[in-house]
Image (cartoon, coloured by chain):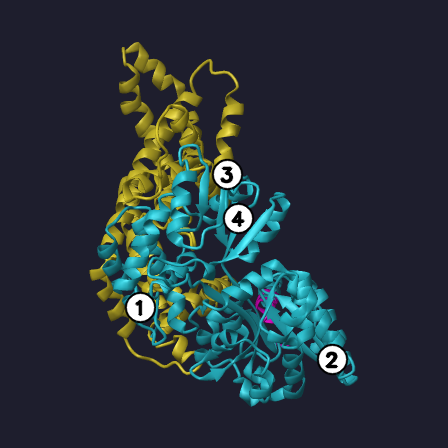
Chain colours: A cyan, B yellow
Amino acid sequence: MKREICKILCGCMIAGLMAGCGEEPKEKQTDSSVKKEASEVKTADKKESAGETNIKIWHDGDESIMDTMEKDVNEMLEEEGIRVSFEKKAALTDQLKLYGTDEVNGPDMYFYAHDSLGMLAEMGILAPLSDILDTASLNGDLNEMTLEAVTYKDTQYMVPVYFETLLFLYNKGLWEGDVPDSTDELYAYMETHTDTEAGTYGVLNQHSTAYNVAPFINGFGGCIIDKEGNPGLNLPETIEAVAYNQKFAALQADGDYNTVTTLFNEGKASAIIGGPWLLSGIKDAGIDLGMKSLSEFTLPNGKALAPYSGVQGVGVLKHSAGAKKDAVEKVLSALASEKVGVDLVVNNNCASANEKVYHNSDVAANEMVLTMKKTADTAEPMPNIPQMSVMWGPAEGFLAAVNKSNEDVSQAAEDFQKEAVTAISDIQ
Amino acid sequence: MKNRKKATPWLYSLPAFLLIGIVIVFPILYTAYISLTNMNLYHWNDFHLIGLENYKRALLKADSGFLSAIGTTLLWTAVNMGVQLFLAYFIALGLNAEGLKLKRVYKTLLMFPWAMPAYVSILLWKVCMFNSEFGLLNKVVTALGGTKLNYLSENVPAFLACTVLNLWMALPFMIMMIDGALQSIDASLYESAMMEGAGFWQKSIFITLPCIRPIIAPSAIMTAFTTFKQFDIIYLLTKQKGSLTGASIQTIITYAHENAFVSNNYGLSSAVSILIFGIIILFSVFTNRGLKEENS
């Protein structure tokens, strides 16, 4: 008897183990952990069968920004029977690697920064926009810089929606005199207004973060990586820029994101170089904020600081470009529309990629967005080639070695250039 | 009948074998398979077998830092284990001292670092201790009239900072083990030794250490493994993306992460993983053999 019970139990355990391998029919999915999701899918399925097309967009951004877009697009496409839902997914690029070709569980589209575009395009999971719509008519009102950002190997894969750049943000209550127009004058101000032992600073920057030093590197004519995928850490222009940044770094605390933002928000620094993402913390701290475009500062070589710009846009997964082409086309056009652009500026302080937006009176009153728009004149889109994903490590290692470990700039440039070359060869 | 008898235990063990197969063996075999392919960004869906090419590349990397990473890992393990056993032994002795009041309170407090999630502990130490602006260490240094220091910007101070943090996090476990072992020693041994005129060191060397060795050896080996494959402390203190400190300490795990896993080259990453897996298996074989010899 015991033996029989043992056999039955063994059988049950094996059946239990194998149960997960089976594929249940959709209508029977009742997993409690995804109950909500399942009910949403069922509702969506019902609606879909009633003639409504559902478009699922994955993102990894600010929920309030996605809410603005979702509300606008759904209003605009209600009569067309198209419903868009934005779903937040942490580590979005990793999720897309797993679900990019999964028509059932994956998204139809994704909303993300443009710098991972090359990687996703090379994986072959993205559809070129020209397969879906007439890009010439869509791009008419869109900013040139943002269009360059979403184009990889002469093919446009995304619709740019808004962009971000670094700004010079200063505390009007602490800043003395006018904000200078050159970086040398800025350095002179820092020298007279910084007491590192007392923990008070003139201007702060994440001096060893590649994105934050890029305005200097690009302005000097150097680069982190060029368009062909060659690392540029040991270019004379890059070395010159990093050496120039080094003297600023000595007056900018340890350059860590948390340290510099806390110092600025606590009123221990007169200014900070940062992006619009700092705004909510600064507002909460009650700081009377002033701002200036980085493109209004000139370097010793007479050129303006040229920060990287990050363009947030929407891309289409290949399977949706075939199955839901018409709906996807309408969603893309809606996201590129003036209405979405204006609402993003008014509600979320996002600098729209749609040029028409800037004629709107509400937009014209938004200082932050206008400052970013001005910066777009000299800003360079972050490289979107796959090689860029492995360049952050060597570039920041180079900056940290120079600014924090006081290594020789030229020697460090050579060392990290070698590291970058190896990292790039490792991709293939 | 005889065959049936032989098969029965296997049949009963089958579900457990299946579970172990699915959860442990399959991922290792699949990683080994991927390590023989060219699966990367450019061959995401159309990857194919390329033989031992990835292993060749992984081993050629030995010239550019893999060997020094192994050296650092061995140093890291040896220093941490040595200091950990030494300190834990004396702290446990202190906790077992006769007449010590509030023993339980001390023991409970000592458990806190071990009970805290590692991620939280590490970031707390990074900001509250080592941060050049807000850290306690620099607050003390400046209060004493010194100049601010950056504890994580160079290799030697960063290695020491990581060691101190690792000791803070790992000591409670070792103290608990030694404390338990100390309590199992027959008190009459000490009484006899005292009557013979033995002092503290003689009692420690001839009674305490031989008595507790069989009990703490397995926990010491377990801790040695944990220390050997330590990743969080070194990565989060010195190499966190976006806030590199300037130190370039590399253990084999941080080296593998930096050189293989960020590249999206899954074939190469898998080859590096399998090599590390082999090193850990070798390490485990040696330690188990040592333990067996000691027991016999």
Tell me, yes or no, whether dots 4 and 3 are on the same chain. yes
* Mark 3 or mark 2, earlier in chain: 2
Residue that numbered label 4 is attached to: A170
* Mark 1 or mark 4, earlier in chain: 4
Q: What segment carries the magenta color?
A: A12-24
* Mark 1 or mark 2, earlier in chain: 2
Q: Nearer the viewer, mark 3 or mark 2?
A: 3
Please tell me which residue is depicted at 37% across the width and 36% down the height of the picture: B164
Answer whether residue A168 is magenta in the image.
Answer: no
- Gap between marks 4 and 2, in whole Å? 42 Å
Residue that numbered label 3 is attached to: A268
Residue A77: image tag: 2
The residue under label 3 is which amino acid type?
Answer: Lys
Query: In the image, residue A328 lies at what x, y percent?
Result: 64, 83
The residue under label 2 is which amino acid type?
Answer: Leu
Q: Nearer the viewer, mark 4 or mark 3?
A: 4
Query: In the image, residue A289 lies at what x, y percent?
Result: 58, 49
Foreground residue among A378 and A397? A378
* Mark 3 or mark 1, earlier in chain: 1
- Gap between marks 1 and 2, in whole Å? 45 Å
- Quick one: SS at disc 2? loop
| Magenta-drawn stretch, dominant element (helix, strand or loop) | helix
Q: Residue furthest front?
A: A177
